[in-house]
Amino acid sequence: MIKVENLNKYYINGNNKLHALKNINFFIDKGEFVGIMGSSGSGKSTLMNILGCLDHEFQGKYILDNIEINELYDETLSEIRNKKIGFIFQAFNLLPKLSALENVELPLIYRGIPKEERLLLAKEALLKVGLKDRINHKPNELSGGQKQRVAIARALVNNPSIILADEPTGNLDSSSEREIMNLLRELNDQGRTIVIVTHEPEIGRECKRVIKFKDGAIIEDVKKL
Ligand code: ADP
Ligand code: ADP
């Protein structure tokens, strides 16, 4: 489902050229739960930007569901991003003036889905993450764990083939962290592919596979039985 071949990424600033990803190769199958680990500056965000179809200025191949991402124009790329990828961020990235329900509706508005169907799908997604009785709450009326649940519902509402999570528990206390990891594992048990960036060893231990980066290169790729 995800194939990365001889992937190289350079950042060029004037005369400075930084080799941020160095000949990366891996394959991620449907239903995997992958942790991307490595210290700050090792290339994790750079990789996630590419996997998330936010950056296609790279060398090598990135194939997502049989589509060669590097050959696409920006417009097609954002279409693929909306359809196939659900993003979860450390800072939740919810719109503060909108209710939980309205936040989850956003990706559907973007796709031009009519109001009635939108409400149905958004409610269903909020039900899946256990927030049925919070749909009209605004973000500041929700706990950190609940905010992240809304963000997960928003990520799920387009039925993406992959969920990309960047330090999803980085802003949460340990009980909310547990709650969110349990939810992600549930989604994975239902067949969702999940790729999660983390520097927390406890989170890494919960992934079924860990790919470790150092200085832009993969130094370890271990699947657990
Ligand atoms: P991580 O997410 O693991 O902290 P990054 O992917 O953010 O690592 O960064 C990898 C390397 O690329 C670092 O040396 C970082 O300073 C550099 N880098 C990241 N983004 C840019 C950018 N937009 N321009 C120039 N250098 C960048
Ligand atoms: P993270 O905490 O996710 O690793 P970073 O702190 O590495 O993120 O980077 C935050 C933002 O700054 C990213 O958008 C990244 O592309 C950009 N960035 C990181 N390093 C550099 C750099 N050396 N020059 C320019 N932009 C950078």
Image (cartoon, rainbow, N blue to C red):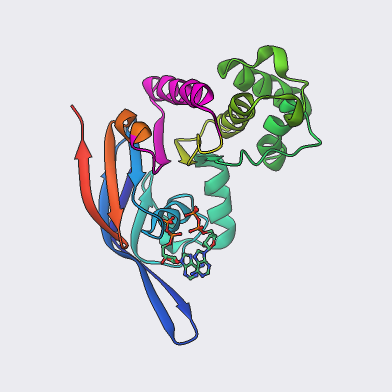
Q: Quadrant of the N terminus?
A: top left
Residue found at the far bottom of this picture = 15
Q: Position of residue 50 (x, y in %)?
A: 44, 56
Q: Quadrant of the C terminus?
A: top left
Q: Quadrant of residue 25?
A: bottom left
Q: Residues in magenta?
A: 172-201
Query: Viewer-proximal residue, 65 or 92?
Result: 92
Query: Viewer-proximal residue, 220 or 104?
Result: 220
Residue 183 among magenta residues: yes
Direction from residue 28 to residue 165 in the image, left or right: right
Q: How many marks?
A: 0
Q: Position of residue 177 (x, y in %)?
A: 49, 27
| Residue at 66% across, 25% down | 143
Residue found at the far front of this picture = 173
Direction from residue 213 to residue 68 in the image, left or right: right
| Residue at 40% across, 79% down | 17
Direction from residue 79 to residue 72 in the image, left or right: left
Q: Position of residue 121 (x, y in %)?
A: 65, 23
Residue found at the far left of this picture = 225
Residue 51 among magenta residues: no
181 over 171 or under it: above or below: above
Residue found at the far top of this picture = 133
| Residue at 68% across, 19% down | 123
